[in-house]
Image (tube, rainbow, N blue to C red):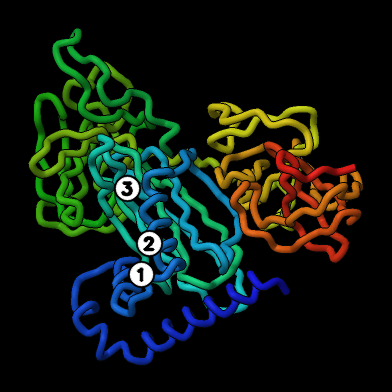
């Protein structure tokens, strides 16, 4: 074990003792902190500050990682699934940005595999509309929870942040999906059967469609999309036989029009799936085939697009198709040149093109992509087919001069070991004038070949 490793273990031990002390004396030192209405992430951050851990390097790195993640999130398409590894030695936070629409429910599931229980903080934010604004937290999960659910109330991107507590390692799998918040209002049908959508022209363009039309045979049950109370059952010139259902929990009213018959009464409480009436073509739909006009009217906002409230893509969560045993290990570019991208998709922008044998550390896996950290620390994605495990050496070389075995590919990196002239090293790859090598004792590190060191 090197002197640097020994010092790091002593430092980590000191941090653990402080955390233990904080846990034992929580009633005295944290009484004021925990009386506030804070999220689990905020409580943990307050705990670090109360005990002075925010003044330590690890504490500062943890706090900074949580803030930086919101500014440097990756953009993904739902449904999304990623597996990765949290290292106790490096405070880290993940952030995923995705589009969301009013009426959708975002569902996040988290699985952790670790020797010890790991507290993981999950927070969902509405993305800021301008660079000067802060992200607005809309939901948080308790540290003991493995899932988070949130109904979206505005059309804007959202950011999910996932961050574990300090000094805990483990493999994570996070899944993010969207689903409709309302049950489909026509029995036996789905969102694939929506024929006319929000905004379609009506009356020769004099007005726009304020709902969706779902065609079905006459007499098909129109059913309650949510539990609630029937507020109106009447006949109008435009809607024909209509039913209004109050969705009290969401402060909105659901509108069922063109019914052939109405089977409920005002004041009646209904449950999801209860029949409200039978589909027809009454009102101004007399010249069209039987269908249900379904609308949503939100309190204080009026008509809103029902489609996201009902749409279920049915798209399966993509399976992890790459070798997850490479998590937290080194791989290298296996082809002459390979593109790394900002997102796990060939449609994503190219971040950089790397030459063969560039070493990359695997931090995650999504579908057939690896999330990798470049030797510079930047993270990006690379197709799994373009890399290979950096286990077998590219070549063996001997040092012509003495050299330091560095812990990073950086001129100011700390030396892990001193290698004498004539030492043999196994070269696993190279990056910007540095070579990733394994010394005769099996330790991995970097040699600065741009300096006075030479290999032969």
Q: Dot 2: few (<14), some (14–19), or many (≥20) neighbours within 10 Å? A: some
Q: Dot 1: few (<14), some (14–19), or many (≥20) neighbours within 10 Å? A: some
Q: Is residue 13 left or right of residue 179?
A: right
Q: Dot 3: few (<14), some (14–19), or many (≥20) neighbours within 10 Å? A: some
Q: Quadrant of the C terminus?
A: top right
Q: Is residue 112 above or below residue 76?
A: below
Residue 454 image-quadrant placement: top right
Q: Percent x, y for residue 27?
A: 27, 90
Q: Quadrant of the N terminus?
A: bottom right
Q: Nearer the viewer, mark 2 or mark 3?
A: 2
Q: Is residue 387 left or right of residue 191?
A: right
Residues 123 and 356: in front is 356
- The residue labelled by disc 2 is 63
The disc, 1 or 2, on the residue closer to the chain's N-terminal end is 1
Gap between marks 1 and 2 measured at Cα: 8 Å
Instruction: Give the residue at x 29% y 77%.
Output: 50
Q: Is residue 324 left or right of residue 414?
A: right
């Amino acid at each position: 074990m090197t002197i640097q490793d020994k010092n790091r273990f002593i430092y980590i031990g000191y941090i653990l003792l402080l955390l233990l002390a904080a846990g034992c004396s929580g009633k005295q030192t944290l009484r004021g902190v925990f009386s506030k209405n804070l999220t689990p992430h905020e409580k943990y951050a307050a705990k670090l500050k109360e005990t002075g851990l925010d003044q330590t390097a690890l504490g500062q790195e943890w706090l900074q990682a949580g803030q930086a993640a919101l500014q440097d999130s990756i953009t993904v398409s739902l449904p999304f699934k990623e597996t990765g590894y949290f290292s106790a030695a490096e405070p880290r936070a993940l952030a995923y940005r995705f589009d969301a629409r009013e009426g959708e429910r975002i569902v996040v599931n988290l699985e952790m595999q670790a020797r010890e229980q790991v507290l993981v903080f999950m927070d969902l934010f509405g993305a800021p509309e301008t660079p000067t604004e802060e992200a607005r937290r809309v939901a948080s999960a308790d540290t003991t929870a493995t899932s988070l659910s949130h109904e979206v109330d505005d059309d804007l991107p959202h950011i999910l942040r996932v961050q574990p507590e300090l000094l805990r390692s483990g493999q994570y799998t996070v899944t993010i999906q969207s689903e409709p918040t309302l049950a489909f209002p026509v029995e036996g049908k789905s969102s694939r059967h929506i024929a006319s959508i929000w905004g379609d022209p009506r009356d020769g363009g004099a007005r726009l469609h304020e709902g969706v039309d779902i065609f079905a045979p006459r007499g098909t049950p129109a059913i309650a999309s949510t539990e609630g109370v029937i507020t109106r059952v009447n006949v109008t010139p435009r809607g024909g036989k209509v039913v209004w259902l109050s969705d009290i929990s969401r402060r909105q009213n659901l509108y069922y029009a063109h019914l052939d018959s109405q089977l409920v009464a005002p004041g009646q409480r209904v449950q999801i799936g209860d029949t409200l009436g039978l589909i027809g073509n009454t009102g101004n739909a007399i010249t069209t085939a039987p269908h249900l006009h379904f609308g949503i009217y939100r309190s204080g906002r009026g008509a809103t697009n029902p489609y996201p409230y009902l749409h279920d893509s049915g798209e399966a969560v993509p399976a992890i198709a790459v070798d997850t045993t490479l998590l937290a290990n080194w791989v290298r570019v296996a082809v002459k040149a390979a593109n790394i991208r900002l997102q796990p998709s060939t449609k994503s922008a190219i971040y950089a093109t790397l030459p063969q044998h560039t070493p990359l550390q695997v931090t995650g896996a999504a579908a057939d992509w690896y999330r990798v950290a470049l030797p510079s620390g930047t993270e990006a994605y690379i197709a799994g087919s373009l890399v290979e495990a950096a286990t077998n050496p590219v070549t063996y070389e001997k040092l012509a001069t003495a050299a330091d075995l560095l812990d990073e590919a950086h001129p100011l990196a700390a030396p892990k070991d001193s290698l004498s002239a004539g030492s043999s090293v196994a070269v696993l790859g190279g990056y910007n004038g540095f070579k990733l090598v394994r010394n005769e004792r099996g330790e991995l590190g970097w040699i600065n070949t741009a300096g006075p060191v030479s290999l032969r």
